[in-house]
Image: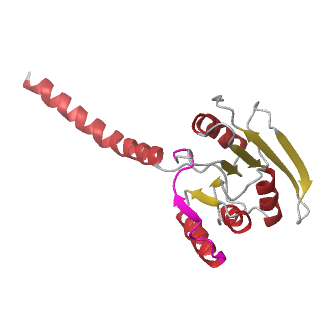
Amino acid sequence: MLTRRVVLAALAAVFAFLIGPWLLLWAQRSAAPQKLAPYVRTPQDVVERMLALAQVGPKDVVYDLGCGDGRLVITAAKRYGARGVGVDFDLDRVKESQANAKHAGVESLVEFRQQDALTVDVSPASVVTLYLLSESNLRLRPILTKVLPSGSRIVSHQFSMGDWEPEKKETFTDSEGAPRILYLWRTDGRVRR
């Protein structure tokens, strides 16, 4: 009987030794923020068209998920007097955004957070902007449509949200000669999976 216990204990120790590091690695990756798109700078004229499409005004709170260098919420604050929150999982982008906001003189109107866009509370937002991949937009769609109040606007640069038809779709050529598409949706209280 003692031999069986010793063998079982030895097998459990070997199993923990071999599998333990893999479980730890999996847990760390699962807890880490997920990259929803590569960082690609949005040209300033596209930023301005996104904000105009959303009809941003001084009473709006603009959340930019995957904010990069912060130019979208900084422009919303500087041009329209809106408050803004930029969210990025990359600490270097967050620091760059904070420095850009200070340089633009709008640091009292905007904040930047290092956080996973899939976990941020967007409920205070009246406008959410995205320049993420379609798959990422689809992952965010049920979150945004559940949490955002009816009438909130979602503007996506270049990528749709699957079968959710946009209220407006703008196609144009930017100042750098690249074709662009902007999508506008308005939440209506219906959760879209």
- Left or right position of 147 against 77: left
The N terminus lies in quadrant: top left
Query: With respect to residue 106, does 177 lie above or below?
Result: above
> Is 106 one of the magenta-colored residues?
yes
Q: How many marks?
A: 0
Q: Which residues are magenta?
A: 104-119
Of residues 142 and 39, which is closer to you in this image? 142
Q: Name the residue furthest front.
A: 59
Residue 65 visible in the snapshot: no
Prevailing secondary structure class for the magenta stretch in the rendered image: loop
Q: Name the residue furthest bottom.
A: 103
The C terminus lies in quadrant: top right
Query: With respect to residue 128, does 108 lie above or below?
Result: below
Instruction: Determine the image quadrant of residue 191.
Output: top right
Of residues 37 and 184, which is closer to you in this image? 184
> Is 131 one of the magenta-colored residues?
no
Instruction: Determine the image quadrant of residue 10.
Output: top left
Residue sitting at 72 percent across and 63 percent down?
A: 80
Residue sitting at 66 percent across and 51 percent down?
A: 37
